[in-house]
Image (spheres, rainbow, N blue to C red):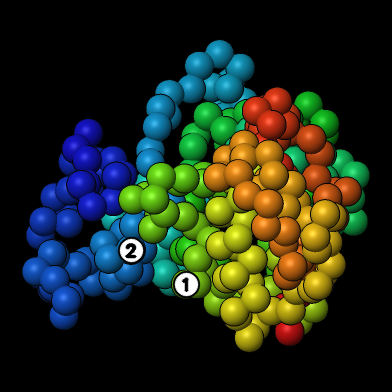
Amino acid sequence: MSESPESGLSASPAEASAHQAAPRTSENSARPVTPGSQAAEGTYRFQPVSFVRRGTRLQGRRQKAWDDHSDTLAVDVPRHIADTSVHPEYTFDAAAEFGRTAPLVVEIGSGLGEAVVHAAKANPDKDFLAVEVYTPGLAQTIQKIVANSLTNVRVVQANAPEVLGTMLPAGSVSEVWVFFPDPWHKTKHNKRRMVKDTFAPLVARVLAPGGLWRLATDWSTYAEQMHAVGTASDLFANVHGGERTGAQSPLTEARTSGADCDVSEEPDAVGGWAPRFEGRILTSFENKAHKAGRTIFDLTFRRL
């Protein structure tokens, strides 16, 4: 496998050959651009992705779950450029996939599937799409789906901006969840964070009017960035604007503890933080954050 230095993604020899043979170039770079590829035009070439590919090997029960059930539970996405890309002409048909019409909830970065499977089990009247780039996480999510005999969850291995930008029909989603995305906490890596100004319009595109964008993080600087992104967008309104200020603010708590930022006595006078989302189970990842003494931040924005 060869690795694309500007994307951090692995490319097969066939993909690498196709990439090298592409005749066009963008206006801003001499890098070749594959015709018709959203991935080449933006996602993988001129914007850093929010993830780095790690191990993809499956073993034991994960391998068996993937072999036995991925044909029915993993969305078959036509690719372009890389194995996490989505061809821009492909559109997901939720009604056909689930065999019914129901509110669709999309979790971006579903990890091992703890949150999405718990939510699907508790809400049989809703359908759920788990978006993840790591094959082992998807396989483990499938294990959980099967173990709970759920019919209202599907998984997809795909890059989130492409899922939101082209794959999902506009206005087709009732809620988008982004729980504990990679914080990329080093300043030089902040540009790789998923939730930034270019991400809000993508979320807004797929949400139906009144739909909710729920976020959670355990890093205070990322929480402030998420808050700023949602607040700055004229496509969203903060459901809890002005709430939890001063001593009631998680930001004040984080500044006081200094667990992930400099200690400060400056209270948060802006607020706007949501209470903990009751529909989010306490995952192993969040539990580690609690043990490390970090503060948990929740935000909820409504699509205008």
**At which x and y percent is residue 24?**
13, 73
How many numbered discs? 2
User: Which mark is first along the chain, 1 or 2?
Assistant: 2
Q: Is residue 171 visible?
A: no
Task: Locate residue 67: give its quadrant.
Answer: top right
Label 2: how many residues lie within 10 Å, few (<14), some (14-19) or many (20+)?
some
Q: Which residue type does callout 1 highlight?
A: Thr
Q: Residue at x 46, y 55 (%)?
A: 193
**At which x and y percent is residue 258?**
62, 40
Q: Residue at x 25, y 43 (%)?
A: 11
Q: In the depicted view, which residue is nearer to us: 244 or 126?
A: 244
Q: In the depicted view, which residue is nearer to us: 194 or 100?
A: 194
Q: In the depicted view, which residue is nearer to us: 141 or 109?
A: 109
Task: Locate residue 28: give its quadrant.
Answer: bottom left
Q: Return the residue found at the far front.
A: 265
Q: Is residue 273 left or right of residue 78?
A: right
Residue beneath label 2, please? 47
Give the label on residue 53, or none. none
- Report the quarter where the N terminus lies: top left
Q: Is residue 286 visible?
A: yes
**At which x and y percent is residue 103?**
81, 65
Q: In the depicted view, which residue is nearer to us: 129 or 146?
A: 129
SS state under label 1: loop
Q: Are marks 2 and 1 in contact (CB under 8 Å)?
A: yes
Q: Residue at x 80, y 63 (%)?
A: 245
Residue beneath label 1, please? 198
Q: Is residue 96 left or right of residue 190?
A: right
SS state under label 2: loop
